[in-house]
Amino acid sequence: MKKQILIFLLIVTFPGILFADSEKDIRTFVQKVYDAWNTLNSQNADPFYAKDADVVFFDAAPFQYKGWQEYKEGAQKYFLDLLATGKLVPNDDLKIKTKGDVAWITLTFNLSGDLKDGKKMNMDLRQTSILEKRKGKWFIVHEHISAPLPM
């Protein structure tokens, strides 16, 4: 009983301890997602995305994807298959907010590489994602990738 009271007091007094672990897990998760996309095979990102039929993803093109299957196929066709080489590098500006089993993240990243037609690509993009923890694992349930308008 004393042990349970001590744990309760630690949680109430130092809630940052729990959030620090959650933030560390999310940082690791985000890096794994980027590592998967950097293989240039959308199939490798499959374990990180929710498979619900009603989830929506926004990428730089086209307008939107309904469901992970559509997103995975579209990203492969409109992006990954055009690259001979490519690299997504997250910047050091990842922000994480959590509330229970839901988290939202924001960050910017750089996309660079060589297109199969010989042209070079280098662009900075923005990402906002909503994550949900299901059975102890994080999944992306919404993602929004965008590019700033040229000024």
Image: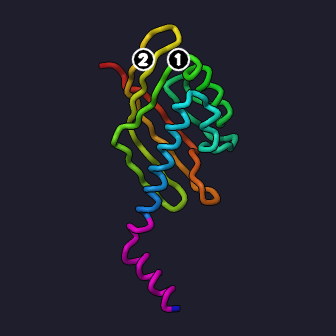
Quadrant of the rendered image containing residue 113: top left
Rendered residue at 53%/49% (across/down): 131
Residue placed furthest toward the top = 117
Element on which disc 2 rests? strand
Lower sequence index among marks 2 and 1: 1
- Lateral position of residue 68 relative to residue 103, left or right: right
Element on which disc 1 rests? strand
- Mark 2, residue position: 121
Q: Is residue 108 above or below residue 148?
A: below
Specify the segment rendered in magenta: 2-18
Foreground mark, 2 or 1, reads 1
Q: Which mark is residue 84?
A: 1
Rendered residue at 42%/17% (across/down): 121
Quadrant of the rendered image containing residue 91: top left
Q: Is residue 78 above or below residue 71?
A: above
Rendered residue at 41%/26% (across/down): 147
**Residue 14 forms part of the magenta stretch:** yes
Structural crowding at the residue carrying mark 2, measured as other residues with C-alpha within 10 Å and reported as few (<14), some (14–19) or many (≥20): few
| Residue 85 in picture, x, y percent from top left | 50, 20
